[in-house]
Image (cartoon, coloured by chain):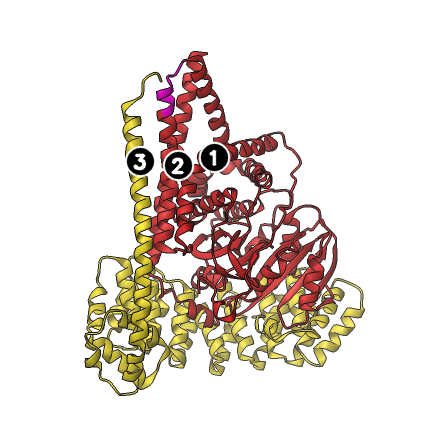
Amino acid sequence: MRDTLVVAGWVLTAHVALFHLITLLLVLAGARRVWRNRHWRGVEGHDETFASPLTPAVSILVPAHDEEAGILDTLSAALGQKYPALEVVLVDDGSTDRTFELVAERYALRQVTPRPTADLPVDGEILSVHRATTGDPLLVIRKTSVGRRSDALNAALNHARHPLVCMVDADSLLETEALLQVSRPFVEDPDDVVAAGGVIRAANGALTDRGTMLEPRLSRRWVVRVQVLEYLRSFLLGRTGWADAQALLIISGAFGLFRRDVVLEVGGMDPLSLAEDAELVVTIQEHLRRNRRPHRVVFVPQTVCWTEVPESWQVLGRQRKRWSHGLGQLLWKHRRMIGNPRYGPIGLLALPFFLLFELLGPVVELVGVAAVLSSLALGLVPPAVAGAVLALAIALGVLLSATAIAVEELTYHRYGRGRDLLALMGTAVVEHLWFRWAHSWYRLCGLVAALTRRTPVWTAMPRVGFSVDRAPAERLVPVGS
Amino acid sequence: MTAVPGPVLLTSTAVTGLVVLLLLSVGGAHLARRRRELRDVARRAELTPLVYTLLDGEQTASSLADAPAVLDDVVLHLLPQLRGNDRQVLRDLLLARGVIDRAAEQLSARAPWRRGRAAMLLGATGSTRYTPDLVTLLEDRSSDVRSAATRALGKAGDVAAVPYLLASVSSARPVPSGIVGMALLDLGTAAIPTLRTALESGAAPARALSAGLLGLHGDLPAVAALTAAVDDAVAPTEVRLAAAAALGRIGAPQAADVLARVTVLATDAALRTTAAEALGRIGDPDSVPALAAGMTAADLRVRTACADALASIVPEGRERLRLLGASAGPAAPVARAALDAVSLDSPRSLAGAR
């Protein structure tokens, strides 16, 4: 018993140390890339991309279910993109609120004959298709909901007409140049680039006006603040690091750009996956690697999409359980890729990391902590030893967050107010007192759901919409411009 | 696990120290940045009118030679937006301030971003003096620098760079075709003769790129070579696709027969789709039978492209669509949808249908 507890304690220590070490390496690699990109600022050629006839047209796909709180802002941001040729395909996925009515009124929708361009299987019934008569390139598909975002996206893919498709959540605001920035790799390397992702940031608490982000501000809620920090670590730096290692596994469903022909080639979105965004990226890479076709999945850290994150522990818990469940599904489905050199850095680095640290991490952490507490209670470990190890784990975690904050401030510095920066620094410390453990618990529940093959359930997140600041015209200068 | 291990304590202390240092640096950097931004805004507001007085001929370049460094940013921002004498005046100012000479030296700097930024700056000046240096950078070990050099060659406007740019698409250290394409478009119509040659005798990537660019230029003399490329069953698909799209952009009715044949008989669905789209752009009523035949294709993309093409041939194509829409079979819904769409097309969605 004594030996088991001591071993469990050391396993936890080693796991935590290794996880932080690897994540720190990723964050440093991401920071290096972000820092290097900083030197090129101003000469990226965005104006040339905007003016170039070689820039491919984009279909922005927006699946929406009960999104009346923010749908008009999301559409304003999507339709207001600085981009030479685009269309927006909104799928009203069985909304029970006024989502469709609001859009129909604003854009004077008119019903048209469906004009599919692909025939991906869709489980929900397509009820009607509408187009805007206001001059906006907006197509709206009404369908019955089967409770899966992937089904709505497949319906949108079937009606998209352009060579690139950009998947955006219905509670997200794209910055004016976001599409131009994220499409740049496709313009520059049209043969090889198959997918590109951008940075997702939390919009909660920020000031917006009709889909335009006026001033990013940090929410007063701790549950939002810890997510802001988490997004900084994982989106800004972690994914940049993975992309540099040619092992990017996830492009967020909130904002990702894909080559439409490749998405159709792999059969669109997996209808049963709870992590359909990661699932799509892994499937594409598996397919192209198996067929020995050159390809690149890239990450564009300067591109920003602002999204609404959960504002309550309950909703956050549901979201994280779903992510963990989805990750379990994904790793099981692509288990042959794990550790397989045929799939390059994805098989050798990314998938093993996600298996050991993201999926199984909560098991090790929670079992390890229980072992340490038991050891303490039984007097097997002196409190000083447990305290020192815990302090090291927390210090390593805070170091990660502090690095992310430092890189953010030295490169993009989106948070102009000093107090927001101070609040972020404080969050870096306090998140380890409770968020980390609650997060592990949610992930463990998701893992159990995946292991017991529970029926995947996609639950919609309650929306509060964006903070509105009906600002005078002179203040309407979007950030990032 | 019974005694506090020394390394754990030591590491904890070191990590904590590092965290404190980082957070203090962040605070310091935040304050310094705010001050610097305010100062730069003030300086820009002060210097920008001086640049305009220089352009108006009320000042000389030498009078601004010792102005603060932020003036260079103002000038470099304005430079790509100007042409002719105004551009020359700003170039002289940069020369007088030593900016151009410093950039030329930086072309061999160790840091890739220095080489890249220097190349971009020299390209923005519109001078052909540095073309050989920029061509050398097309083989740089950094892909970012190769891309920057490519863009710079396009901005510099030296048509002598065209063969090098085309070759860079398929060199050992290739430059992505999109960047080369944009640079070649920047060079304008002067690049067309070399593009025509590359279409017939270049490597496959250069042929495809040349075909696409000739189409964007609307180059009528290239129609014969483009038609031959589409008709060449053993040519690489990328070349045939680009040539078919180019013929559509040019709107060459003499290519309609070949495009119609490809629409009906080719095995590659993407090629059939592109050929049908080209026929729609050309708008030749003689293509209607081929497009109607294409609407029986098994591939939905081909059917849709044929329907859209028919919808853009007025009135013959739309008449045929109405007949097809009233009939039974897989063509009917596609025909009805295409007709519905043209009755509602907005200017922006048409612009996006490339």
Q: Are marks 1 and 2 in contact (CB under 8 Å)?
A: yes
Stretch of the chain drawn in magenta: A380-387
Figure chain in yellow: B
- Disc 2: host chain: A
The circle on residue A397 is: 2
Residue type at mark 2 is: Gly
Q: CA distance from mark 3 to mark 2?
A: 10 Å
Judge from the rendering whether residue B309 lies leftward or rightward of residue B57; answer left or right: right
Residue B53 spot, x, y in % from top left: 29, 84
Front one among A174 and B43: B43
Residue B352 spot, x, y in % from top left: 57, 70
- 10 Å neighbourhood of mark 2: few (<14), some, or many (≥20)? many
Magenta part mainly helix, strand or loop?
A: helix
Q: Is the C terminus of chain A in the top left, top right, bottom left or bottom right quadrant?
A: bottom left
The circle on residue A311 is: none
Q: Which residue is mark 3?
A: B15
